[in-house]
Amino acid sequence: MTPFPVTAEKQEPGGDSPHLAYHLYVHEPGEVEVQAYLSPAFDFTGTGGLRYAVSFDDAAPQIVNMHDEGSLDPDHFRPAWMGMVADNIQISTSTHVLETPGEHVLKFWMVDPGVVLQKLVVDTGGLKPSYLGPPESFFRPGE
């Protein structure tokens, strides 16, 4: 019997552990910000937040807690939760450095069960503010 997501085992990111991989191209090397658009979720584990990991190429996965310290504070949590539920989205961010221009592979790793990814936005600089992020990029294979 396959376990439900909330009863699945926590995973150590890296190697053959569960992950999604996205090929992308950057024109300039440097710092990039990855915004993970996640479904709102409570920390049902009671361990200080639900985690996932992000990496590029063969770099070590960077573990990210989708519940920042402020969101665990009851006085801060209620208004933040109401906004996340109204938008049906919770945005969590990580920062990475790409040393070279060209093709890279972005990997989104499972760490804790219950994290539901809706979309990823990679900001290489100049991302304009928008409600729930920019539209999906056009993918044209083989060119």
Image (cartoon, rainbow, N blue to C red):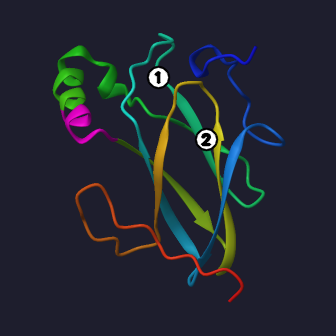
Q: Nearer the viewer, residue 43 or 6?
A: 6
Compared to residue 42, the image places residue 46 above or below, namely above
Would you place residue 73 above or below residue 116 in this image?
A: above
Q: Which residue is mark 2?
A: 53
Name which quarter of the figure residue 92 lies in.
top left
Residue 66, percent from left and from top: 44, 34
Residue 118 relative to residue 89: left or right: right
| Residue furthest front in the image | 1
Residue drawn at point x = 29 percent, y = 55 percent: 132
Labels 2 & 1 near each other (Cβ < 8 A): no
Where does the magenta region start and end? 83-89
**What kind of element bears circle 2?**
strand
Residue 99, image x, y percentages? 66, 72
Q: Quadrant of residue 101?
A: bottom right
Q: Nearer the viewer, residue 112 or 124?
A: 112
Residue 124 in the image, given as x and y percentages of width and height: 47, 72
Question: Does residue 12 appear in the picture of this structure?
Answer: yes
Are there few (<14), some (14-19), or many (20+) residues within 10 Å of tag 2? Answer: many
Q: What amino acid is at disc 2?
A: Ala
Residue at horizontal 37 percent and vertical 26 percent from the top: 69
Left/right of residue 70 with respect to residue 49 in the rendered view: left
Left or right, 99 with reference to 50: right
